[in-house]
């Protein structure tokens, strides 16, 4: 009878533990007790300590606050956004079990998140490990994108996949890098709205939205932050104790242009004007800094944080060095700096460039290859009756010089036109010292009616750095990197470079707005009457180069930016994008000296074979 009673009491205790409310602790307290950092995901594996990044404590407390429905984190890089999300997942797995959905920008990123971050946390945290059945056990329902545990489950979804977003009701939603989400998940609508609708059945629902911002007016995370408490982390001045956020406009620094290194950096107090370094401003960090709200909100707390507030692995000197490098690289890199380092949205300027401005900027080259050029690339546009070719010279900081625009006319069904193309791409161009430059990388359009012919022609010429490309542009604001991997899924097994043309156009237009001669600028030649093969950079060329503009559109009330063609022909712009991709693929060292005068500058690098759909910037 005693044994029976013990079993009954044990069963009753187990039942009560399932229905009893969880102990009222915060996400940060749970993490300090139970989270273990895995060796795959941390340079310092071991028990989690919130004190190492104390700015995370208040946002984690907000996530577990029963009065808060949504938490918005408009945060820069280097601040532990992923670990904060993992702590939230662990809390709602091991402490307050619930149905969870984690949304990544696409399914590939979702799988990587599950394999590289989530699974190691479940494996190495003692409280969580017994709760989540190992993926390889025979009776497990668990997969990479779906896992169960007592009292809940977790779905890892891709914002680009309507099927992965289709799920049973969800109590806890975590959206990561939501500014990279597509405008619509297939035909279903805005991914954020779709998943928010699945939380309606829960009175204690929780939504956590995380991202670095992107373009002003089209940034999801900025819109959500503006409809929140708008909290910023404030630091007391070491002199007057007045609280203020750390901002870039209050950063004062010295920079050595020769060594390209920050030698001093201080932050100016906006109240008393005192200058102090990073150590002084961050002294007694956990005790003295506070989150200050910009307005009241009944259900949503929003937190904005720049990398200037980082406590580990990033310094103000790092920020200054990044800023100076971005400034040399032009508006596109400055946008990335302010988005990812300062957590600021970027207001687009120069969205449209007038062709007359560029036409009037042309200058006389003394030689076919001007001083400053280190490498030549070429781009080939395939038309039904011709090839259009643009050869560009590249120098430090991706400064560029147009070298020659050339057309090869003929019937692309006949071999001789392909031979003429081959002959042109084998030519050399000479600089003032008599060096002969060969084309180091050529990208060739494989669209249109001659796709197979392009693949067949490029395949044996890969050793010369000649590759076919396939442009990709969703047209809905979805971010696709300029170099978006490779594929060889064609009958000729030719390597095909996948290009995100929207990002390429943004980089081209950014360079067009830079004053000639400055780092990252574009320069164009005037026709040379003494040359029997004159340069063909005429008014029609510049009309084509500026034939598109960036506009903001809306889908289901969500703003996004898209490139819109304003003229019938845009071959010159396409070729500029291919050339930009070509030089980035090479990832060249512009600081290397040129060979001796009179020599040949060539030797294209053979590409290493990589798997399909890998980033190609360093491997090709």
Image: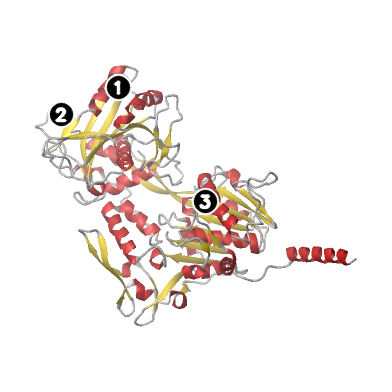
User: Mark 3 sits on what residue?
Assistant: 116
User: Mark 1 sits on what residue?
Assistant: 418
In front of the other: 488 or 196: 488
Q: Percent x, y for residue 456? A: 37, 23
Instruction: Report the mark closest to the observer, 1 or 2.
Output: 1
Quadrant where the N terminus is found in the figure: bottom right
Instruction: Report the mark closest to the observer, 1 or 3.
Output: 3
Q: Percent x, y for residue 334? A: 32, 56
Alpha carbon of mark 1 to alpha carbon of mark 2: how far? 20 Å
Q: Does residue 169 appear left or right of residue 243 in this picture?
A: right
Verify CB contact (< 8 Å) between mark 1 and mark 2: no
Is residue 1 at all visible to an observer of this figure? yes
Q: Measured along the vertical axis of the image, is residue 514 above or below residue 456? A: below
| Element class at badge 1 | helix
User: Mark 2 sits on what residue?
Assistant: 533
Alpha carbon of mark 1 to alpha carbon of mark 3: how far? 47 Å
Instruction: Report the mark closest to the observer, 3 or 2.
Output: 3
């Amino acid at each position: 009878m005693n044994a029976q009673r013990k079993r009954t009491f044990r069963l009753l205790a187990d039942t009560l533990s399932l229905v009893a409310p969880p102990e009222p602790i915060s996400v940060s307290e749970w993490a300090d007790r139970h989270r273990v950092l895995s060796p795959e995901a941390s340079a310092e594996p071991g028990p989690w300590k919130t004190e190492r990044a104390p700015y995370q404590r208040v946002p984690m407390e907000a996530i577990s606050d029963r009065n808060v429905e949504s938490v918005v984190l408009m945060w820069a890089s280097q601040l532990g956004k992923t670990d904060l999300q993992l702590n939230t997942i662990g809390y709602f797995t091991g402490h307050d079990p619930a149905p969870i959905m984690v949304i990544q920008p696409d399914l590939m990123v979702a799988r990587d998140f599950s394999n590289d971050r989530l699974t190691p946390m479940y494996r190495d945290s003692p409280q969580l490990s017994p709760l989540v059945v190992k993926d390889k056990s025979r009776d497990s329902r668990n997969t990479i994108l779906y896992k169960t545990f007592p009292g809940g489950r977790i779905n890892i979804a891709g914002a680009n996949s309507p099927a992965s977003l289709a799920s049973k009701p969800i109590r806890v939603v975590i959206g990561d890098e939501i500014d990279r989400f597509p405008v619509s998940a297939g035909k279903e609508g805005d991914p954020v709205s779709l998943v928010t609708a699945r939380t309606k059945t829960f009175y204690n629902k929780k939504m956590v939205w995380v991202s670095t911002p992107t373009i002003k007016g089209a940034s999801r995370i900025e819109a959500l932050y503006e409809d929140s408490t708008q909290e910023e982390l404030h630091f007391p001045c070491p002199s007057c104790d007045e609280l203020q956020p750390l901002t870039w406009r209050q950063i004062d620094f010295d920079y050595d242009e020769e060594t390209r290194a920050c030698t001093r950096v201080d932050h100016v107090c906006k109240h008393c004007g005192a200058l102090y370094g990073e150590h002084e401003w961050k002294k007694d960090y956990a005790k003295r800094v506070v989150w200050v709200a910009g307005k009241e909100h009944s259900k949503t707390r929003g937190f904005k944080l720049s990398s200037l507030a980082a406590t580990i692995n990033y310094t103000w000197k790092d920020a200054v060095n990044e800023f100076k490098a971005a400034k040399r690289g032009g508006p596109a890199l400055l946008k990335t700096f302010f988005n990812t380092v300062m957590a600021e949205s970027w207001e687009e300027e120069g969205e449209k460039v007038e062709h007359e401005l560029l036409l009037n900027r042309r200058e006389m080259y003394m030689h076919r290859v001007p001083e400053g050029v280190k490498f030549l690339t070429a781009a080939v546009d395939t038309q039904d009756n011709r090839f259009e070719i643009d050869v560009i010279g590249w120098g430090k900081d991706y400064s560029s010089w147009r070298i020659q625009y050339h057309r090869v006319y003929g019937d692309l069904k006949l071999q001789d036109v392909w031979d003429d193309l081959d002959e042109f791409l084998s030519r050399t161009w000479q600089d003032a010292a008599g060096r002969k430059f060969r084309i180091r990388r050529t990208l060739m359009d494989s669209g249109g009616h001659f796709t197979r012919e392009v693949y067949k022609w490029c395949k044996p010429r890969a050793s010369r750095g000649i590759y076919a490309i396939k442009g990709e542009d969703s047209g809905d604001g979805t971010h696709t990197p300029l170099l978006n991997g490779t594929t060889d899924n064609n009958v000729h097994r030719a390597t095909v470079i996948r290009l995100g043309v929207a990002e390429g156009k943004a980089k081209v237009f950014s360079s067009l707005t830079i004053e000639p001669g400055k780092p990252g600028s574009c320069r164009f030649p005037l026709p040379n009457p003494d040359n029997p093969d004159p340069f063909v950079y005429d008014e029609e060329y510049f009309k084509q180069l500026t034939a598109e503009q960036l506009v903001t559109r809306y889908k289901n009330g969500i703003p996004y930016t898209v490139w819109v063609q304003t003229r019938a022909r845009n071959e010159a712009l396409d070729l500029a994008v291919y050339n930009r991709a070509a030089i980035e693929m090479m990832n060249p060292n512009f600081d290397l000296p040129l060979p001796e005068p009179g020599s040949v500058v060539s030797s294209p690098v053979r590409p290493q074979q990589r798997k399909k759909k890998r980033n190609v910037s360093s491997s090709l």
